[in-house]
Amino acid sequence: MSKRAYRKAAAANHPDRIPETTRRRALQGSAEAYDVLGDTQKRALYDRYGHEAFARTGGSSPASTM
């Protein structure tokens, strides 16, 4: 990566240029992934059912059948 490309990427991803809501969503997604990967039962549910295992949609969820 050239110095010019690095500076352009750094400027585009600088915290002062990214809106608060975008940063919050990115951090929330990282925290959820860490939570799922750190717990063996949650990881097994995610492996079996994907993101829908933790979706809060009312009705029966795959998490309730385990």
Image (cartoon, rainbow, N blue to C red):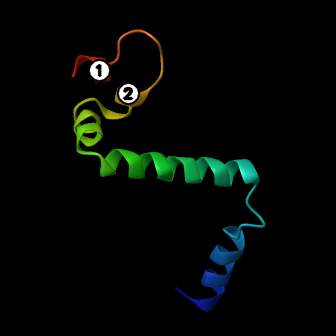
The answer to the question of whether label 1 and label 2 lie on touching residues, with beta carbons closer than 8 A, is yes
Task: Locate residue 63, reporting x and y percent.
Answer: 30, 24
Q: Name the residue beneath numbered marker 2.
A: 52
Q: Hey, what amino acid is under mark 1?
A: Pro
Q: Name the quadrant containing residue 27.
A: bottom right
Task: Locate residue 61, reporting x and y percent.
Answer: 34, 17
Q: Name the quadrant containing residue 53.
A: top left
Query: Of marks 1 and 2, which one's residue comes earlier in the chain?
Result: 2
Q: Hey, what amino acid is under mark 2?
A: Glu
| 57 horizontally vs 51: left or right | right
Distance Cα–Cα, label 1 vs label 2: 8 Å
- When the figure is inspected, residue 36 is found, relative to residue 54, above or below; the finding is below
Residue drawn at point x = 32 percent, y = 50 percent? 37
Helix, strand or loop at mark 1:
helix
The label number, if any, that marks residue 62 in the structure image? 1
| 53 horizontally vs 16: left or right | left
- When the figure is inspected, residue 8 is found, relative to residue 25, above or below; the finding is below
Residue drawn at point x = 61 percent, y = 81 percent? 5
Q: Nearer the viewer, mark 1 or mark 2?
A: 1
Helix, strand or loop at mark 2:
helix
**Residue furthest to the bottom:** 3
- When the figure is inspected, residue 61 is found, relative to residue 3, above or below; the finding is above
Residue drawn at point x = 40 percent, y = 47 percent? 35
The label number, if any, that marks residue 54 in the structure image? none
Dot 2 crowding, Cα within 10 Å, few <14, some 14–19, many 20+ = some
